Image: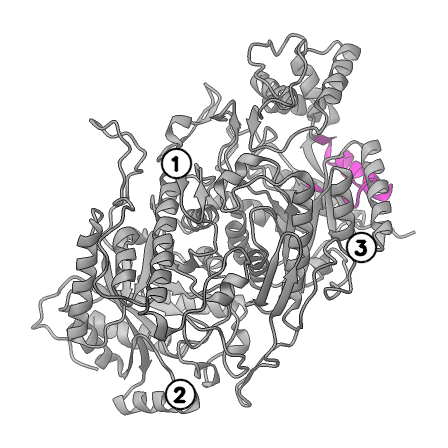
């Protein structure tokens, strides 16, 4: 542990999120002592993780999900392996379950945009926001796999391997799915806006429960879906829950720039972090973003131990069993070493990090009991929760409903830029 | 002779004229605290299940959002999952539409709810009743009556096949041997029918109940047959003793014809309860509540649901409309299930009621829409509930009150203890799952059970 470093002036505190997936992000995690693989499909598993994260004052938790079984590669069909964690609970319902059992931490389930109904997605996340008193978020994800499309049988998605991403076919598929994702998010946001604040008036004198002039249809007609609206759920406490997505390149950054609040990125060193931040800002300009700038969090897979050697040994032991291949940088270090790196990279313009514990709960415990106190000593992390709302925690204003009348304007303003075509990307990214 | 044990559920007074939002005791219909309070009360009373309805579009009248009733409700799945966290024993039943949901997602969400709640999930399978709801969904189109039931049948069969596609012991999670799954083929499914052609691997392990409890509300002959073939419990709105007996006999006979044991299916009418210290006080209170539920304006709207036209120029205290219903016209009130399949016959029946009793329009509507089945002292209400059940007019009730969320309190505090003293209602939860609490057998594996989706088959 380092001594407090008083020579560095306190900067704005880091944002720290933690990403939950199964028994951790390492495929061999479930074999580790201290994990509870037999409890993975129980409420207890999730409650204990969420409460630990909240004890650590973390900004939010994300919960991975998908419309098919896990595979080593997001684009590939799962191998029929029996030696890895397979199967998941529905992330949005896990988040809902956690809402009354936590009080301050943000709850951000992954919900895909490709086969789901925007109306249901909007209702579920608005309700999560009501039930959690303003702590709901959404990790937007596309569903690119052919086997996932076959689970729905409504639409064919061609199988595209990672090596084919930079072919015309691969680029077309990515553009289609990310374009649709942007439309879905925009539609969901419209549904959240479709009830103006205070629409429920309960005016017993006139017998009116709502002021129907403050309810609005959204009338979206997209290629793959249509929604008339208004929402069935009154406007959520945050106005709009926090929208986050993962980006590995320009196309996903564009999606985030068009419709997101937070973007998770995967830089591999400090220079890369600067490049990623630049890419996100470029995408924002290309998209004509008028909302507040994206909050950029860098993803790291973390393996923590009391000594550097111990951490490397842990990773080596895990890899010997079943090697980890990751889009994000894998960091095996001490809590203090991790704190050094987080503060070092931050200079690139990052707002914070989303840590993916390699082993749960082991590395989560190390984050909460080791990293967090270390960052607090350095004045780089909160010592208590100040805000209740998740948007507020990221310094994001509560959006006014785009349908609310504004003085001097007769037209319906869009909160986010419209979904008109944007300039073609100069580089290609892989889907989130 | 052993007396039948009574099944009791509670519905959340969300929308419809039953709930009186203008009552000063009424709380929010959206806020989490309302749902939590209601659920904790129900569990304190040892009730079998909670029941949440679903909304997929706002109601309109003449194309305008109908603003007089409670408008808006939270997402059913999300609220039930949150309630799973603050309750331990009570069943969690949700109405979820089979027209605008896909089997893969339905199966995952109910399996997840069953896992998170430790085996307390129940699905009330409904089909969409009107075309404009489709405007909110990808499907986007209206399915005719026959297709809706075909889709419901295929959806249920597919969902059951997905629930069955993981073996009970599929998750081994043996750290020493390195075997996480016992079989590489877990989750395999392939289903094809007129509505679906789907295949792949399901992603959620088998849940504690295997199959969450299936609820149905069948009205039409097709609906009754579907329910009789598929449901573990059937809701009804047949509440008066004779009609309840008739429905009970009819549906149990259909269950038998479907090749199932009639004891496997619980029949549960919904019932409003109004209590008083004396019968006279209860009747007076009921009259007051009923006046608020079917106020002059609501009586016009309910008549409009039959006549399918604007009746706002009619006097609620005057006679029934002298014009005929226009069922062929575009729907005047959208987003609400129709009150009748035969508006002309219903209008004629209402006219007879009005003529026989000298009723005004509003008095007629109040007569028809008296949802308070049980009005009286707690002893009287307990007597009546018990009489219905022991006489095979029902197996129990889904209880409601006009006040959200505290209306359930007095039922739990004053009626339930009497039923417990008589030995016809549990004093504590003994079963682990909703299925066990309802006395239902574990589900047969798919294919071993008769149902309407027989053309579907599991590949593995």
Q: State how far apart marks 1 and 2 are (Cα).
A: 50 Å
Q: Tell me which residue sits at (70%, 26%) in the image.
A: B370
Both marks 1 and 2 on one chain: yes
Q: Earlier in the sequence, mark 1 or mark 2?
A: 1
Rendered location of residue B177, percent (x, y) = 55, 90
- Looking at the rendering, the stretch of residues picked out in magenta corresponds to B372-398
Q: State how far apart marks 2 and 3 are (Cα).
A: 50 Å
Bin the neighbour count of mark 1 within 10 Å (Cα to Cα): few under 14, some 14-19, many 20 and up.
many
Bin the neighbour count of mark 2 within 10 Å (Cα to Cα): few under 14, some 14-19, many 20 and up.
many
Let me know if residue A432 appears in the view: no
Magenta-drawn stretch contains A171 = no
Both marks 2 and 3 on one chain: no
Q: Secondary structure at mark 2?
A: helix
Q: Nearer the viewer, residue A404 or A187?
A: A187
Rendered location of residue B232, percent (x, y) = 74, 53
Q: State how far apart marks 3 and 1 are (Cα).
A: 44 Å
**Pointer 1 chain:** A
């Amino acid at each position: 542990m380092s001594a407090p470093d008083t020579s560095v002036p306190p900067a704005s505190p880091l944002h720290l999120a933690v990403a939950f997936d199964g028994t951790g992000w390492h495929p061999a995690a479930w074999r580790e002592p201290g994990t509870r693989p037999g409890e993975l499909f129980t409420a207890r598993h999730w409650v204990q993780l969420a409460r630990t994260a909240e004890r650590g004052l973390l900004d939010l938790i994300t919960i991975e999900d998908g419309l098919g079984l896990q595979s080593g590669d997001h684009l590939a069909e799962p191998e029929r392996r029996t030696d890895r964690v397979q199967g998941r609970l529905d992330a949005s319902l896990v988040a809902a379950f956690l809402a009354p059992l936590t009080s301050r931490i943000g709850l951000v389930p992954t919900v895909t945009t490709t086969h789901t109904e925007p109306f249901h997605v909007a209702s579920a996340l608005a309700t999560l926001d009501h039930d959690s008193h303003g702590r709901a978020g959404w990790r937007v994800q596309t569903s690119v796999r052919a086997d996932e499309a076959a689970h729905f049988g409504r639409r064919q998605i061609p199988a595209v391997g990672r090596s084919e991403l930079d072919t015309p076919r691969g680029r077309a598929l990515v553009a289609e799915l990310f374009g649709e994702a942007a439309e879905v998010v925009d539609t969901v946001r419209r549904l959240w806006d479709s009830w103006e604040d205070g629409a429920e008036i309960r005016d017993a004198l006139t017998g009116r429960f709502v002021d129907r002039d403050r309810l609005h249809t959204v009338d979206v007609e997209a290629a793959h879906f249509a929604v008339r609206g208004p929402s069935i759920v009154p406007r959520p406490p945050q106005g709009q829950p926090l929208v986050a997505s993962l980006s590995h390149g320009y196309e996903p950054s564009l999606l985030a720039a068009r419709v997101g609040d937070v973007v998770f990125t995967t830089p591999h060193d400090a220079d890369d972090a600067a490049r990623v931040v630049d890419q996100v800002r470029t995408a924002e300009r290309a998209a004509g973003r008028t909302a507040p700038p994206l909050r950029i969090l860098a993803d790291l897979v973390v393996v923590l131990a009391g000594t550097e050697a111990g951490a490397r040994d842990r990773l080596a032991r895990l890899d010997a069993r079943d090697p980890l291949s990751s889009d994000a940088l894998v960091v095996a270090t001490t809590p203090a070493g991790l704190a050094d790196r987080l503060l070092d990279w931050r200079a690139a313009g990052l707002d914070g990090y989303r840590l993916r514990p390699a082993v749960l709960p082991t590395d989560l415990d190390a984050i909460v009991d080791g990293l967090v106190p270390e960052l607090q000593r350095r004045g780089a992390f909160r010592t208590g929760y100040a805000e209740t709302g998740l948007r507020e925690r990221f310094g994001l204003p509560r959006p006014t409903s785009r349908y609310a009348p504004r003085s001097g304007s007769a037209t319906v303003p869009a909160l986010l830029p419209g979904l008109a075509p944007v300039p073609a990307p100069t580089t290609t990214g892989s889907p989130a | 002779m052993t007396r039948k044990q009574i099944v009791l559920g509670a519905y959340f007074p969300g929308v419809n004229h039953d709930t009186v939002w203008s009552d000063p005791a009424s709380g929010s219909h959206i806020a989490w605290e309302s749902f939590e309070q209601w659920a904790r009360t129900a569990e304190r009373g040892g009730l079998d299940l909670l029941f949440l309805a679903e909304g997929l579009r706002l109601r309109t009248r003449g194309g305008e959002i109908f603003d007089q009733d409670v408008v808006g409700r939270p997402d059913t799945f999300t609220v039930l999952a949150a309630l799973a966290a603050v309750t331990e024993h009570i069943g969690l039943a949700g109405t979820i539409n089979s027209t605008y949901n896909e089997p893969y997602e339905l199966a995952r969400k109910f399996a997840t709810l069953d896992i998170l709640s430790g085996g307390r999930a129940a699905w009330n399978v409904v089909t969409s009743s009107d075309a404009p709801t489709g405007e909110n969904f990808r499907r986007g189109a209206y399915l005719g009556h026959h297709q809706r039931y075909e889709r419901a049948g295929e959806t249920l069969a597919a969902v059951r096949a997905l629930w069955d596609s993981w073996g009970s012991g599929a998750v081994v999670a043996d750290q020493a041997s390195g075997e996480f799954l016992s079989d590489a083929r877990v989750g395999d499914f392939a289903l094809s029918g007129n509505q679906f052609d789907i295949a792949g691997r399901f992603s959620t392990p088998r849940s504690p109940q295997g199959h969450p409890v299936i609820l149905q509300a069948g009205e039409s002959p097709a609906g009754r047959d579907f329910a009789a073939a598929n449901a573990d419990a059937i809701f009804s709105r047949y509440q008066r003793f004779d009609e309840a007996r008739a429905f009970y006999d009819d549906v149990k006979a259909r269950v038998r014809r479907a090749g199932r044991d009639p004891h496997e299916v619980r029949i549960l009418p919904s019932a409003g309860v109004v209590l008083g210290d004396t019968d006279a006080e209860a009747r007076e209170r009921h009259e007051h509540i009923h006046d608020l539920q079917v106020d002059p304006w609501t009586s016009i709207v309910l008549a409009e649901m039959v006549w399918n036209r604007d009746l706002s120029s009619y006097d609620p205290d005057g006679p029934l409309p002298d014009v005929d219903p226009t069922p062929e016209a575009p729907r005047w009130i959208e987003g609400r299930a129709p009150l009748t399949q035969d508006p002309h016959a219903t209008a004629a029946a209402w006219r007879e009621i009005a003529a026989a009793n000298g009723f005004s329009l509003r008095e007629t509507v109040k007569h028809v829409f008296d949802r308070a089945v049980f009005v009286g002292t707690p002893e009287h209400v307990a007597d009546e509930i018990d009489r219905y059940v022991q006489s095979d007019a029902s197996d129990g009730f889904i209880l409601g009150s006009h006040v959200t969320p505290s209306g359930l309190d007095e039922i739990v505090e004053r009626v339930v203890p009497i039923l417990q003293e008589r030995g016809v209602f549990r004093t504590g939860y003994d079963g682990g799952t909703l299925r066990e609490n309802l006395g239902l057998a574990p589900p047969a594996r798919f294919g071993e059970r008769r149902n309407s989706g027989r053309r579907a088959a599991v590949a593995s």
